[in-house]
């Protein structure tokens, strides 16, 4: 029964970190800062990241999308001038030994368009959708918000290809619902917000926004019908009557964008000449849409909205562990032997029941262990001590509750599984 985690909490976060998510994640030993906008994921943090990835994969696979892995290194020759110009401030550009120019992908439309061009010949090849979970690079001048805005980050990007607009619209709606499921499973409440298509398209796109004062985006929002529009593009103003339900005055709220979906239409297929032969034997441009979720940013957003003064409060499905198991020694040899045996038995029973346990056997004071439990924020705390083993019980407490309960091991398992 060895300490099964790289448990490295800190008393203080770096002074230059102002965002709550950065402070708590660094103090809790989830991430470590390497440079401005560049973070390393430690074992606890990587577990959370992987759990979010797993939810995303399950929902993408449910849509019928297939997973791929594109390259982060992209030849600049593949990029059109207007696209380079529109992103020039955030691009990492580099040369190889033969003086050929490359960039570290800030996005993958160019590469996926090339995939479409190679593999789409006729209407029989359509529709299809491909996604990847892959590192992106953006030279962010404002990298000050912890995981909310970084220069290297992992993103899920999905691309869909269709023979006509109607088919694209239907799939777009399906993805919108799929996104709502993903955020719900991650414990986030989101607003679906209308936004301009930006560099990508003339139509509205949709952004999935989490309301919080820490957010950098401003959204015009109706609390009656949930109508929301990005303030940057909106002709609407605060206190104006909602154009949708006409019942409530609009409010301006701050948000973090955790996902977005764009109808690309035929923009990229025209740019890269991606055509197919339709049923009527005519050559047509392919319709496309793209859909993104920043995995690390989602994790940061969860921390921003799900925490208290003591630390993080992880939603169950993405918590690093369900249970934080703390064993406290008494200093009396006989009783400590009993505590050790009971802890071992409990730990093994949890594993058998497929309950994920963070085992804290560090040789530090009970106070420090309890402090770290609140900071790390697993949904349940279980304590095994002199008091509990004398009654053949364990002490269980939910992260948000104040009073612990003394229960048998089997009762604890019932609570954990319910
Ligand atoms: Zn309304």
Image (tube, rainbow, N blue to C red):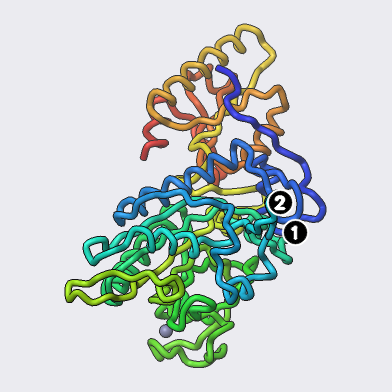
Label for residue 18? 1
Left or right relative to 4: residue 345 = left
Q: Residue furthest top?
A: 334
* Residue 288 seen in the figure: yes
Residue 284 occupies which quadrant of the picture?
A: bottom left
Above or below for 268 versus 183: below
Element class at badge 1: loop
Disc 2 to disc 1, C-alpha distance: 7 Å
Residue 23, disc: 2
- Measured as percent of width and height from the top left, residue 377 is found at 58, 43
Residue 358 point in image, percent of width and height: 55, 31
In the drawing, does residue 297 fall left or right of residue 416? right
Confirm or reject: label 2 Cβ below 8 Å from ligand 1: no
Answer whether labels 2 and 1 touch (C-beta < 8 Å): yes
Residue 54 image offset from top left, x and y in percent: 43, 45
The residue sitting at 50% across, 64% down in the picture is: 110
Which residue is nearer to you in this view: 310 or 1? 1
Mark 1 or mark 2, which is nearer the start of the sequence? 1
- Farthest residue, direction front: 98
Question: Where does the image place residue 252, in percent across and percent down from the top left?
Answer: 57, 81
Dividing the image into four equal quarters, which quarter contains ligand 1?
Answer: bottom left
Dot 2 lies on which element?
A: helix
Q: Quadrant of residue 117?
A: bottom left
Q: Residue furthest right?
A: 15
Q: Residues within 10 Å of mark 1 (few under 14, many from 20)?
A: few
């Amino acid at each position: 029964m060895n300490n099964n985690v790289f448990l490295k909490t800190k008393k203080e976060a770096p002074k230059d970190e102002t965002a709550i998510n950065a402070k708590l994640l660094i103090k809790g030993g989830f991430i470590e800062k390497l440079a401005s906008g560049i973070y390393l994921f430690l074992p606890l943090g990587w577990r959370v990241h992987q759990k979010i990835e797993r939810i995303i994969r399950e929902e993408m696979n449910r849509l019928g999308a297939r997973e791929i892995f594109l390259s982060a290194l992209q030849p600049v020759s593949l990029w059109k001038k207007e696209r380079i110009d529109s992103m020039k401030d955030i691009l990492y550009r580099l040369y190889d030994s033969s003086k050929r120019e490359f960039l570290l992908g800030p996005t993958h439309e160019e590469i996926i368009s090339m995939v479409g061009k190679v593999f789409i010949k006729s209407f029989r090849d359509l529709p299809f959708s491909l996604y990847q979970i892959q590192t992106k690079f953006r030279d962010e001048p404002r990298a000050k918000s912890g995981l909310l805005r970084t220069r290297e980050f992992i993103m899920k990007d999905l691309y869909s290809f269709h023979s006509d607009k109607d088919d694209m619209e239907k799939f777009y709606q399906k993805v919108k619902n799929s996104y709502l499921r993903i955020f719900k499973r991650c414990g986030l409440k989101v607003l679906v917000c209308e936004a301009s298509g930006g560099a990508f398209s003339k139509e509205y796109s949709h952004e999935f926004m989490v309301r919080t004062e820490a957010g950098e985006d401003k959204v015009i929002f109706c609390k009656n019908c949930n109508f929301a529009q990005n303030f940057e593009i909106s002709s609407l103003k605060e206190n104006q009557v909602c154009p949708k339900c006409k019942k409530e005055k609009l409010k301006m709220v701050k948000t973090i964008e955790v996902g977005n979906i764009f109808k690309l239409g035929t923009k990229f297929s025209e740019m890269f000449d991606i055509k197919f032969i339709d049923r009527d034997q005519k050559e047509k441009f392919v319709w496309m849409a793209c859909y993104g979720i920043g995995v690390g940013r989602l994790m940061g957003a969860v921390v921003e909205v799900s925490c208290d003064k003591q630390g993080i409060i992880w939603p169950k499905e993405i918590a690093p562990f369900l249970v934080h198991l703390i064993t406290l020694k008494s200093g009396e040899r006989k009783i400590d032997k009993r505590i050790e045996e009971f802890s071992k038995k409990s730990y093994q029973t949890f594993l058998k029941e497929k309950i994920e346990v963070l085992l804290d056997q560090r040789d530090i004071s009970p106070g420090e262990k309890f402090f770290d439990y609140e900071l790390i924020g697993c949904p349940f705390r279980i304590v095994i001590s002199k008091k509990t083993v004398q009654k053949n019980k364990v002490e269980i407490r939910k992260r948000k509750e104040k009073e612990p309960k003394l229960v048998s091991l089997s009762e604890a398992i019932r609570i954990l599984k319910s």
